[in-house]
Amino acid sequence: MKLTIIKETVAGEARVAATPETVKKVVGLGHAVTLESNAGLAAGFTDAAYKDAGASIAKTAATAVKGADLLMKVRGPSASEIKTLPEGLSVVALMDPFSLDPSALNGRKITALSMEFTPRITRAQSMDALSSQSNLAGYRAVIEGATIYGRAMPMMMTAAGTIAPAKVFVMGAGVAGLQAIATARRLGAVVTATDVRPAAKEQVGSLGAKFIAVEDDEFREAETAGGYAKQMSEEYQKKQAELVASHIAKQDIVVTTALIPGRPAPVLVTEAMVKSMRPGSVIVDMAVTQGGNCPLSKSDEIVDVDGVKVAGFSNLPAHLPADASALYAKNLLAFLPLITAEDGSLNLDTDDEIVTAMLLTRNGETVNERLAS
């Protein structure tokens, strides 16, 4: 199989879909790898390092994809990129499937596989790119928040006086939220967190943070057998909103992480809550690409609201391009055997539930039920 990696064209995207380490392993499996020149440079990986790992270097993207069986990317190809791809090529990437118009892909009979649709099953954990990238995003959100905050995070006792520790509130205790909690704790902040799932309380507590929620009978029964949150009553939502509003007013940094695939992000921090915070406080909105958990946030901007900084970051993993690329490339490496035939050729004629879940388009048709619905 011939695998190809090209430079990412999305503004600010510094990640790459393969590292010299993963290229060496892919070549060791008997595959050929071609990279567009400088495809990994923004992440700190040189053409020379890729050559040493056994890859070929092409001067242009058009040359790199010529004769390729599989194109591996970080971000899905744009409409202009799709026009330059060979007809019938297979592409695996973070396709942003719920915002995708598959017509351009189908027009060139591109087979597209979305890393976002990797099933959340034990066998696919090593392929879960959303988790690997969210982990780094949660870490970076706190680093960015601490930088914007402009004051010390830990308590500091000096001869001139004592500096109080920063108060950090993390909203959402998924992969990104838990890493944000851990990072803020390592920086010495006093950390609190909230989540709609009762099971999250134990996870938050294990990281040394305090859980904030109205813990009545309804809350204790708010999780389904499958681990998902139930819809809460209006009465409960009102009580929870009042508790969160009073808590946010006392915080220095708030990190919001709530995302729902295919839907606008839920509003967690209202304009009134923002204005209740002290000047110098910071809100880091990790959901800004889907409308934001705060209606005042703007993508890749820091909005000043009466001295409160509301920061929206659309691509936090790209702020850590070397590590983000390394983890993402390993996700792809773990997925590769599922679409490799015994003779080493590309095989998408498989009933494997992971491959089936990830397939978006094939042979000029949209084949994924989640896109058709």
Image (cartoon, grey):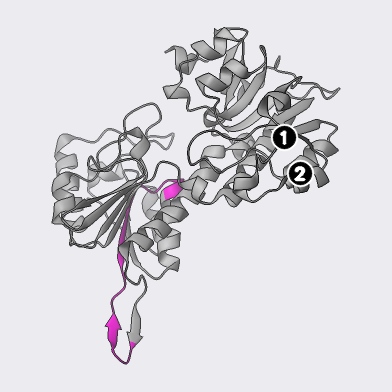
Left or right of residue 350, residue 121 in this image: left
CA distance for labels 2 and 1: 8 Å
Q: Earlier in the sequence, mark 2 or mark 1?
A: 1
Circle 1 packing at 10 Å, graded few (<14), some (14-19), many (20+), is: many
| Figure quadrant of the C terminus | top left
Left or right of residue 137, residue 289 in this image: left
Question: Magenta segment, which residues?
Answer: 158-176
Q: Nearer the viewer, residue 353 or 70?
A: 70
Q: Which mark is residue 292?
A: none
Residue 290 visible at all: yes
Quadrant of residue 121 within the rendered picture: top right
Q: Which mark is residue 35?
A: 1
Q: Is residue 169 magenta?
A: yes
Disc 1 secondary structure class: strand
| Figure quadrant of the N terminus | top right
Q: Tell me which residue sits at (74%, 18%) in the image.
A: 347
Q: Is residue 181 magenta?
A: no
Q: Tell me which residue sits at (83%, 25%) in the image.
A: 344
Determine which residue is flagged by label 2.
Answer: 50
Which x, y percent locates residue 115? 56, 30
Q: Tell me which residue sits at (36%, 58%) in the image.
A: 145
Quadrant of residue 112 within the rendered picture: top right
Quadrant of residue 72 within the rendered picture: top right
The amino acid marked with disc number 1 is Leu
Which x, y percent locates residue 82? 57, 18
The amino acid marked with disc number 2 is Tyr
